[in-house]
Image (cartoon, rainbow, N blue to C red):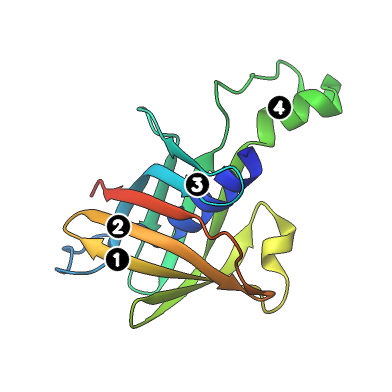
């Protein structure tokens, strides 16, 4: 379930932020957003509410997005000496962190995101993209995974985010 939440938060983060240094356009997804809820369908459906303080932030400008998030159920351990840390210690500290930035385009109610830089090298393969349908109501954004370079998403997650700026 943690991997599913990570994928959901990552996609949502990419879609959720207003233009930096500019006023928010009415009806625009440009802005700064935080994911507050993730709904996952499938054989074991679940809705996860993200408690305060929310460890995620997505910034969306006119053509670019950037998102960071921590996908852990508790605090990540601080490593006293990285040179002496075990693989398990490194994974516990840095594994739950997600960072990605790229470009996006909107056609109708679909947003297609193309990563330029990502902590996850698989997200940066040539031709990689994700497509999400979205609905904006006031300062609340709902996005649902639709597809990626491999085709349609089975059991698409829906992410609810709120504008924070």
Q: Read off the residue under disc 1.
A: 135
Secondary structure under the numbered disc 2 in the rendered image: strand
Q: Position of residue 144 (x, y in %)?
A: 44, 62
Decide: few, some or many residues near mark 1? Use Cα within 10 Å; few <14, some 14-19, many ≥20. Answer: some
N-term mark: 3 or 2: 3
Q: Read off the residue under disc 4.
A: 92
At horizontal 33% and vertical 73% (from top left) the residue drawn is 62
Alpha carbons under labels 1 and 2: distance apart: 6 Å
In-image side of 67 versus 52 (left or right): right
Q: Read off the residue under disc 3.
A: 68
Total numbered labels: 4
Of all residues, the one furthest to the bottom in this rendering is 107
Alpha carbons under labels 1 and 4: distance apart: 35 Å
Q: Are marks 3 and 1 in contact (CB under 8 Å)?
A: no
Q: Are marks 1 and 4 in contact (CB under 8 Å)?
A: no
Alpha carbons under labels 3 and 2: distance apart: 17 Å
Decide: few, some or many residues near mark 2? Use Cα within 10 Å; few <14, some 14-19, many ≥20. Answer: many
Q: Read off the residue under disc 2.
A: 141
At horizontal 52% and vertical 51% (from top left) the residue drawn is 41
Say which quadrant the N terminus sits in. Answer: top right
Alpha carbons under labels 4 and 3: distance apart: 17 Å
The foreground one among 12 and 92 is 12
In-image side of 126 versus 70 (left or right): right
Q: Are marks 3 and 2 in contact (CB under 8 Å)?
A: no
* Viewer-nearest of discs 1 and 4: 1
Q: Are marks 4 and 3 in contact (CB under 8 Å)?
A: no
Secondary structure under the numbered disc 4 in the rendered image: helix
């Amino acid at each position: 379930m943690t991997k599913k939440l990570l994928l959901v938060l990552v996609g949502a983060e990419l879609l959720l932020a207003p233009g930096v240094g500019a006023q928010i356009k009415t009806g625009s997804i440009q802005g700064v957003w935080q994911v507050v809820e993730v709904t996952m369908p499938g054989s074991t459906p679940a809705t996860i509410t993200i408690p305060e303080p929310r460890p995620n932030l997505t910034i969306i400008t006119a053509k670019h997005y950037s998102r960071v998030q921590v996908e852990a159920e508790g605090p990540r351990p601080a490593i006293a000496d990285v040179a002496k840390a075990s693989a398990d210690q490194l994974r516990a500290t840095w594994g739950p962190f997600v960072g990605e930035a790229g470009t996006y385009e909107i056609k109708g109610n679909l947003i297609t995101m193309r990563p330029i830089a990502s902590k996850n090298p698989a997200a940066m393969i040539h031709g990689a993209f994700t497509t999400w349908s979205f609905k904006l109501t006031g300062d609340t954004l709902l996005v649902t995974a639709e597809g990626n370079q491999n085709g349609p998403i089975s059991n698409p997650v829906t992410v609810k985010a709120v504008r924070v700026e």
